[in-house]
Amino acid sequence: MTNVVDRIGDVSASLVDLYKDLHAHPELSFAEHRTAGIVADRLRDLGFEVHSGVGGTGVVGVLRNSSSLRKSSNLRNSSGATVLLRADMDALPVEEVTGLDYASTERGTDKEGNDVPIMHACGHDMHVVALLGAARILSETVDSWSGTLEVVFQPAEELGAGAQAMVDDGLYELIPKPDVVLGQHVAPAPAGIVGLHSGAAFAAADSMLVRMFGRGGHGSQPETTIDPIVMAASAVMRLQTVVSREIAGSDTGVLTVGQFHAGTKNNIIADHAEFGLSIRTVEPDVRTRVLDAVHRIVCAEAQASGAVREPELIAQESFPVLINDGAACDRVSAAFRGVFGEHGVIDPGPVTGSEDVGILADAAGAPLVYWLLGGADPEAYLKAVTAGTVGEDIASNHSPRYAPVIQPTLDNGIAALTAAALEWLS
């Protein structure tokens, strides 16, 4: 491992410009054409067998490091492990306000046809570049390992649809099923820290669009209308009681209304209003309870307001609970301690964010290990902790102010992926 780690600094330095380029040119889910093209070209240059357009815009690279593996068609049972490393590529409809000289000014069209700003507000650009760095190091140190390395650059994680799209498009007909699936997500923790939790590590997520229908009219004559804004606003406020009053304090549940749309002019009462919500849970019975409560409350508010028709509750993105394999986590944690030291590896506990990488592991029948990678400036983070202002001063994922500090985040991201892979490949 020592000769591999010694290469990280040089490889990382050569990727900084690419990181800035990807950050400045983000692409929405299933539209990651430019990013995918760059990834595919880089992998070919490193000697990987490359498959493009998997699941729409996904890219897969395969490097077989054994003559016996090259001759075998059933690679999973050949000598040497098969390891899959995964990164996601898509960005978000967020307008960047970081002030960085490589900040995004890109715009695009979302799946509803709206013109929107685009930003890598969740750090997927860092994921892509770190995996390219690990791929380069492993491809240039083949004397240090044996087996099959698979690198998957996945589209549309933000929709919870990219992993399933790749599986449905025959991912495991193109490449062998892996013995382990590994990956990471940059987080607003100090760079130099990796966080790994065994068991249920990321929550399930359900997104829903709610439409409520009234009767429109003139703003001066509300008595002739049924105001859908008041109706929907009442539902939004009542929904805040689902977690606080219907879910036990010991259970995990989050319900967020992230968008609300209605009307076109101040003196017009609209005929409908709509809002979008996101639900995070871990236990299946809690998920059922929350979803049932949402339906009950929305329908009751519509009835109480005299709505002209039943509301529409339209299911959208859905992510399963991410389960990290216990034994595989132990192996990766030990490898990480050898790289980051005892105090550099923490157990953050389960988080309420969501991820679809588990679909890749489930489809292969393989264990999953997925960890958090600190991306905040360590000095700024410590200062915020001391002042009690972490929430205000350290931007979180999906914030228009979010951008991981490039170094040492990139060094650490490459090191983490490489060390985890070598735990199976060495």
Image (cartoon, helix red, strand yellow):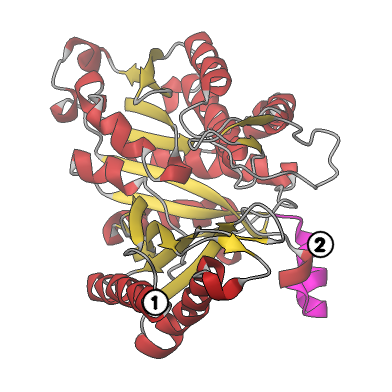
Residue at image coords 44%, 37%:
156
The answer to whether one can see residue 64 in this image is yes
Residue at image coords 41%, 66%:
279
Describe residue 227's horizontal placement relative to residue 15 as left or right: left
The answer to whether one can see residue 426 in this image is no
Give the camera-side residue of 321 and 41: 321
Residue at image coords 73%, 71%:
390
* Res. 252 mark: 1
Percent position of residue 70, x then y? 24, 12
Residue type for callout 1: Thr
Quarter holding the C terminus? top left
Nearest to the eye among marks 1 and 2: give it. 1
Question: Is the residue marked by circle 2 packed among few (<14), some (14-19), or many (20+) residues within 10 Å?
Answer: few
Residue type for callout 2: Glu
Percent position of residue 362, x then y? 22, 46
Question: Is the residue marked by circle 1 packed among few (<14), some (14-19), or many (20+) residues within 10 Å?
Answer: some
Marks 1 and 2, Cα distance to the nearest angstrom? 32 Å
Q: Mark 2 points at which residue?
A: 379
